[in-house]
Image (spheres, rainbow, N blue to C red):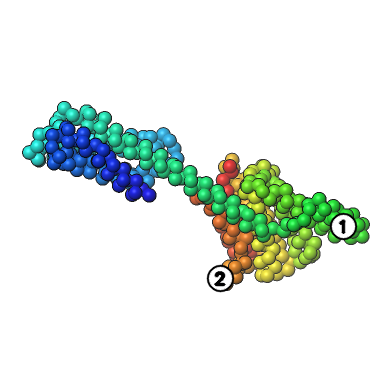
Amino acid sequence: MFWRFQLAGWVTFVVVTLPLKIDIMGSVSAALFLSVTRDGTSFLLTLALRALYRAYWSDKGGQMAVLIIGACTGAGMLQNGLFFLLREILPLDSEIFRYRSLAFSVFYERVGLLYSWSFLYFGMRQALQSKQHQLELALAKSARQGAEIQMLRAQMNPHFLFNALNSIQTNVENVNPNLGRMVQSLSDFLRFSLDHSDRDFLPLGREFDAMCDYLAVEKSRFGDTMEFHCEIDELARGVLVPGIILQPLVENAVKYGRDTSELPLRIRVQTVRVDASTLQIIVSNSGEWQEPASRDKESHLGLQNLRRRLVLIYPDKHQLDIVHRDGWVTITICLPIL
């Protein structure tokens, strides 16, 4: 796209300004020579400006303003120096080589042209980045919806579901308190899933509590063969995170931990607000790391979806590390606090 606009823009500029050059120079050949020397060198200089802007790109407006001013002014002076060098070499005496045109050429015509090109370049770059950002958000939302499929969801009237679960809990908790607590945890987990299914971001504390309900249900299923310990920094409870970020990690720990760990399977979850700008999530399980099977499309699918979502939402601003040693698998995620 850059080359399309670069070539089309300069060709249009040459064609539009050629009649003016013919009027100034008095002949077509001299006007073409003027186009080659001025517009040709401007074309090459704008390529150099593009390389410079890409190399030193920054989100800081002041820094970029200094870069643009210095680069355009320096390029204009370099171009004007080339004009006067040609004046000494070539036996020509036309408007392009007159010393009295120095101020106009450097500070108005050439530098002004380079400034205009720079503004167009950055404007189009910003527009393309905005469209790219919108595309990434759409992809992130699509990936989040894919992650939601991995969660257990009721496909019936929520009121009917919760009323039924409450009735079951009331009838069983006097007979079997453990089963009653399991039903309550399941009800709370499903309520969270239904209430937050359409939210892109939510407070970490809400998903943390739902994750504890999920682990409580699993604990009821597996009994003494599973243990878990969860901690959350109170300062981290209100931090907004992408919906369904803990769940894939915990499901991964339960699924693959039970395949590789000696019993009881041990799971640890810790969330910490490291500082004012960084959130850290650590999920560990006893056992061994299992590499994703190339033929198994479901292998580590939740973790793969999560990794893709983080890349789309926090490009180059997050960290996800997997460490497996001494009989433990630990996944650590560091996220910027929005």
Is 179 positioned to the left or the right of 139 in the image?
right
Q: Which mark is residue 256?
A: none
Q: Position of residue 66 (x, y in %)?
A: 36, 34
**Crowd tier of the residue under label 2, counting other residues whose Cα lies within 10 Å: few below 14, some 14–19, many 20 or above:** few
Q: In which image quadrant can residue 168 be found?
A: bottom right
Residue 176 versus residue 107 in the image, above or below: below
Q: Which residue carries the number 2 mark? A: 294
Q: Given the current orientation, which residue lies at the most extreme left position?
A: 91
Left or right: where 122 falls relative to 276: left
Left or right position of 195 against 37: right
Q: Position of residue 80 (x, y in %)?
A: 20, 36
SS class of the residue under badge 2?
loop
Residue at x 31%, y 45% (from the top left corner): 8
Q: Check the image and name the residue furthest to the bottom.
A: 295
Q: Looking at the rendering, in which quadrant would you find the C terminus?
A: top right
Q: Few, some or many C-alpha atoms within 10 Å of disc 1 (few <14, some 14-19, many ≥20)?
A: some
Type of residue at label 2? Ser
Query: What's the amino acid at mark 1?
Result: Ile
3D distance between C-alphas at marks 1 and 2:
42 Å
In what element is the residue under mark 1? helix
For residue 145, what is the image quadrant?
bottom right
Q: Quadrant of residue 327?
A: bottom right
Q: Position of residue 248 (x, y in %)?
A: 65, 58
> Residue 168 — which label?
1
Residue 78 x %, y %: 22, 38
Residue at the location (65% across, 62% down)?
A: 252
Position of residue 233 relative to residue 266, above or below, is above
| Residue 331 showing in the rendered view | no
